[in-house]
Amino acid sequence: MRLNPCELEIDLFCRGVRVPESVSLDGARGVRRTRAGLGSGLEVAIPTGSWLKPEIWMNAPVAEPFARTSPYVVRGAPGAYEVLDEPGGLSYPIRIPPQPRWYDRLTSRDVPMSRIGVLQGTYLGIYINPICEFWASELNCRFCTTGQNVGATEARDKAVPDVVETCRAARDYSGATFVHLNGGFQGSRGIAMAEPYLRAIKKDVGMLVGVQLAPEKDFSRYDRLIDLGVDHLSFCVELLDPAWFARICPGKQRMLGQRLFFDAMEYCARRMPHGAVSGEIIAGIEPVERTLEAIDIITAHGAFPTVCIFRPTIGSDMEDWPPPSYEDMRIVMRHVYEACRRHWLPIGAAPNIEVSLVVNPDDAALLADLDAGFYGYEAWRRLVRIAARPIFRRRMKPVARPRRALRAA
Ligand code: SF4
């Protein structure tokens, strides 16, 4: 049976895709295993042919063992790729985005910009802080590879000027509008460490900025981030079931506790514009009913759910685990969209933010029943997008002119 573009996205996350050596990926965006390691696959854009959104971005697993037995295989050549479902004999056109020209450029401190930040979909992702402290005590989240990537495939220390210059390049050469800064667990210093980056990006570049850190108990620190102009805050609670949370995220369990994630999420959602806060979870580890419950709790807290499909990333403690089933993940993603609709969350309102590591909530509109509620919500979303344009334009204005010129590698 032919899958629609969101169904294909989900199936590719669950089964991966093979890329034969005979298929040239010349000029394509290379695999970048940075941050937690989820970007370890091939960046792909799937045209939808739908009025809902033109393309769906995703990062299709290619390196993990399960991808080697995938029914999907990439065919074609630069400019004309497709994914073939070999057993079914069905082909789906895809676009493989080009490698950003600025990846090889050097910052003024001679660091290649791709070691500072990478595009994950259309947004720029940068791990800013020292290696998450959970790694030093073997309390790291079991799916994560940050401790292997920071200092190896990406620079260990990201100086503020390097981050600013990389943001500026991503904005100018790739049209990026949003930079996502994350930094793991740093005790009670994580937010303070993020502040100089936020301040400098807002002042010198003017992109939308998201911050994702382990929650801190002094919530007034979030007020400071909001005062500095942060546009998005996300909280990675990962799993709802307490036993699974403790088993997969031992550091978060021991040092923070699950409750703190939801409390911080709720606190920030009350202070920031509707839709500016998200709760991140991983689907495909705990029973699917708990994932659905987590989605309901996150949306009831006024946040939107960011749901990663579990990937047994090479090098992680869970590399031998199986990926989840398509059927379960389709149920989860449909639930994401329905929960956002129930709470009138303005998903997809910000300009040009397509996250390739997850099924974006508005991707999942393609899974919904086409009833009156669907058309009402979609019409409202369209109006919100139009009304929000001048607000985002204003928020993306730097407060000072860029000073440094880029240097070619
Ligand atoms: S908090 Fe967990 S997921 Fe985040 S960087 Fe640390 S170990 Fe990785």
Image: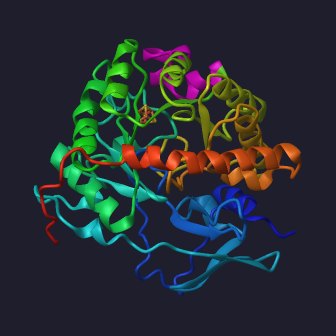
Q: Nearer the viewer, residue 2 or 325?
A: 2
Quadrant placement of the C terminus: bottom left
Q: Say which residue appears at 55% left-offset and 42% top-offset.
A: 318
Q: Residue 91, image x and y in percent?
A: 74, 79
Relative placement, left or right, of 283 versus 250 is right
Is 360 in front, or is 184? 360
Q: Is 257 covered by the magenta stretch? A: yes
Q: Quadrant of residue 297?
A: top right
Q: How is the image coloured?
A: rainbow
Task: Examine the residues drawn in magenta and state their main secondary structure.
Answer: helix
Q: Quadrant of the N terminus?
A: bottom right
User: Which residue appears at 36% of the width and 57% of the height?
Assistant: 118
Q: Which residues are magenta?
A: 242-260
Instruction: Tell whether 392 sits left or right of 329.
Output: left
- Nearer-the-camera pick, 295 or 66: 295
Q: Residue 238 at x, y = what percent?
A: 57, 32
Relative to 82, say whether 133 is above or below.
above
**Whole-percent x and y of residue 309?**
63, 46
Q: How many marks?
A: 0
Which of the four quarters of the rendered structure image does ligand 1 lie in? Answer: top left
Location of residue 204 in the rendering, given as x and y in whole percent from the top left corner: 21, 47
**Which residue is at 21% across, 34% downward?**
196
Residue 325 visible in image: yes
Q: Residue at x 40, y 80 (%)?
A: 27
Looking at the image, is 193 positioned above or below residue 81? above
Q: Where on the picture, by quarter, is residue 226?
A: top left
Q: Of residues 22 and 295, which is closer to you in this image?
A: 295
Q: Is residue 36 magenta?
A: no
